[in-house]
Image (cartoon, rainbow, N blue to C red):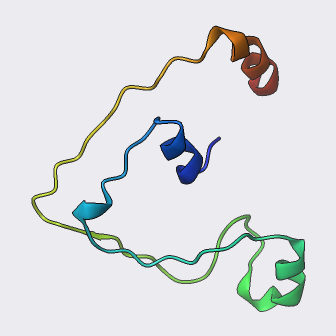
Amino acid sequence: MLSRKAAEKMGLITVNYEQFQSVKSIEGKLNGKAMLQFPDLFNDEIDTLPGEVKLTVIEDATPVVCPPKRLPVEIKDQVKEEHG
């Protein structure tokens, strides 16, 4: 599993930021300290926060789907070991 930032750097996805009218997000890393310091913000489910997020895009935005890129031969065995 890759983060959006990693997938963009690898050229696996393209995010057309100019197509967004507005984006609201919470930046930062979640770790055990944050969960202990702010237990009222987190429930029993992993990676969830209370509330809703709304993504608004330009009405005439054209979605783009890029085919997945092939893995280099050098790392195929390593990926198979890691992901079964």
Percent across and percent down for residue 31 are 83, 70
Name the outermost residue toward the left. Answer: 60
Quadrant in the picture for residue 54: bottom left
Q: Quadrant of the C terminus?
A: top right
Percent across and percent down for residue 53 are 44, 76
Quadrant in the picture for residue 41: bottom right
Q: Nearer the viewer, residue 43 or 30?
A: 30
Q: Nearer the viewer, residue 82 or 46?
A: 82
Q: Quadrant of the N terminus?
A: top right
Name the outermost residue toward the top. Answer: 73
* Residue 31 to residue 42: above or below: above
Q: Nearer the viewer, residue 75 or 56?
A: 75
* Residue 19 to residue 79: above or below: below
Count the numbered circles shown: 0
Q: Residue at x 75, y 26 (%)?
A: 83
Q: Is residue 76 left or right of residue 22?
A: right
* Residue 80 to residue 9: above or below: above
Q: Residue at x 47, y 79 (%)?
A: 52
Q: Residue at x 83, y 79 (%)?
A: 35
* Residue 8 to residue 58: above or below: above
Q: Is residue 16 left or right of residue 46?
A: left
Q: Nearer the viewer, residue 43 or 29?
A: 29
Name the outermost residue toward the front. Answer: 9
Q: Is residue 82 left or right of residue 48?
A: right
Percent across and percent down for residue 80 are 74, 17
Percent across and percent down for residue 47 are 69, 66
Q: Is residue 79 left or right of residue 68?
A: right
Q: Residue at x 16, y 49 (%)?
A: 62
